[in-house]
Image: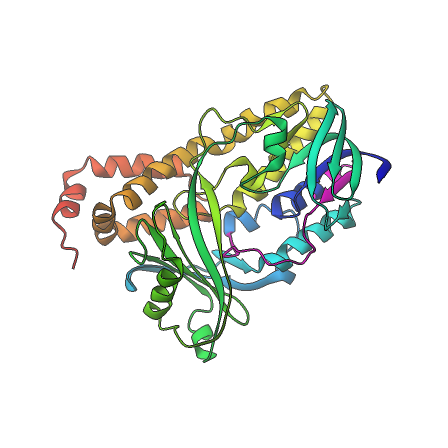
Amino acid sequence: MQSDTKYDVIIVGGGPAGGLLGYYLACRNLKILIIEKKHLPRYKACGGGLTRRAFKAIPFDISDVVEDYTYTAKMLLMDRPLFSKTLDRPIIAMVMRDRFDQFLIEKAVSMGAVFQENTSFRTISGKTGDLTVTTSKGKFKTQIIAGADGVNSRVSKILGLRVKCNFMTAIEGEVYPENPADIERFKGSVHYDFGVIPKGYGWVFPKKTHLSIGVGTFSPKLKNWKQSLNSYLALKNLSSYKKLKPLKGHLIPFRPKRNNIVSCSKGLLVGDASGFADPLTGEGLYYAIQGAKIASEAIIKGFESEFEHINRYTKSIKKQFQKDLICAGRMAHMIYTFPNLGRRILNVHADDLALKQLAVICGELTYSKLFRELLLQMMSPSKIIPVIFKSLS
């Protein structure tokens, strides 16, 4: 099937980055086609935690798809409390990705974008400004293509772009406890548990009728994933449940290489396809949401400059994210790669670090500034000596 319609932009992938990019571009009266290989709504393995900096960056109200608002953040070491803080504004808005992703697509469609599901991307041919996109449902013409197709982006490969990064591996499931009180005791709070998995952490994100629970690690050697998650459930007194589904693993990109190239004159990458995520927490949604806005601005300018600004998108998005993520990556390396040192740091400086981390995810502090402050502390004998001699008991 050959479409007679020529689109301004075809977006591959119906996740948050693809949906929001479609919305921004449709708002500018561009002809947009979003293709998605699956049928929406579809389950996506993801904690579904939208940090304040993330949901504040969305240009419309999302309360219809919020399952729970988190006002309290807790940091624990093997379920032993290290830090707890309750704020008067939400820290995280909890969503289920099936409903959230569909909600964003519907917003894009309401502004005029066309959405086609059950359609797999295959290849691209043609020259800049006159591309043919071949899919499982036929061929479509476009001026620009945007790859929002995840960590194994096929668009990236076809365009010859360079996205190299490290990966955090996580396994996550939706837990429906036998006792409703087990849901209530987590409502309004988020738990980050360190020490429950080598070189990583566990999390509990409350939803309306269940808990999203997972463990993630930066170690490439971990194999007993189900056992690790079951051990974490036992630690949180959640071994008794009616249902645990669907228990899926996923890759989270982090620490993208400095020489990565995420755009060319034919198109660009957004979301996980571009390789940006928080190396301390694994948060990718903020970078998908903010990246979609940066990409939309590059595309709009691209139509005004013979597509030159599409090439410049790589520089623009790196300027926004790279320096901060390098600093976050150094802190993650210190905490996760050297677990004994990481535990000592958490034991001694949990309050200070957690408060600063909260400021970051609330959009009030950058990782660059946090890292500078951390270095100054490490040079102070009054700060480093307790880390060296603190008991790990």
The answer to whether residue 8 is seen in the rendering is yes
Q: Is residue 59 left or right of residue 138?
A: left
Question: Quadrant location of residue 240?
Answer: bottom left
The spot of residue 215 in percent (x, y) is 40, 57
**Magenta stretch, main secondary structure class:** loop
Extreme residue in the left direction = 389
Q: Which of 363 and 347 is in front in this view?
A: 347
The spot of residue 27 in percent (x, y) is 75, 41
Magenta residue check for 308? no
Instruction: Locate the N terminus and report the quarter of the image it occupies.
Output: top right
Q: How is the image coloured?
A: rainbow
Extreme residue in the bottom direction = 179
The spot of residue 245 in percent (x, y) is 52, 66
At a point 34% along the width and 47% down the height, the residue shown is 221
At a point 63% along the width and 30% down the height, the residue shown is 158
Q: In this view, does 48 lie to the left or right of 193?
A: right
Magenta residue check for 24? yes
Up/down of 176 relative to 250, above or below: below
Instruction: Locate the C terminus and report the quarter of the image it occupies.
Output: bottom left
The spot of residue 93 in percent (x, y) is 53, 58
Q: Which of 82 and 275 is in front in this view?
A: 275
At a point 51% along the width and 51% down the height, the residue shown is 52
At a point 66% along the width and 35% down the height, the residue shown is 146
Q: In this view, does 31 lie to the left or right of 393?
A: right
Up/down of 105 relative to 371, above or below: below
Magenta stretch, residue numbers? 23-51
Query: How many circles with numbers are drawn on the protein?
Result: 0
Up/down of 129 relative to 75, above or below: above
The answer to whether residue 29 is seen in the rendering is no
Q: Which of 1 and 331 is in front in this view?
A: 1
Question: Quadrant location of residue 311?
Answer: top right
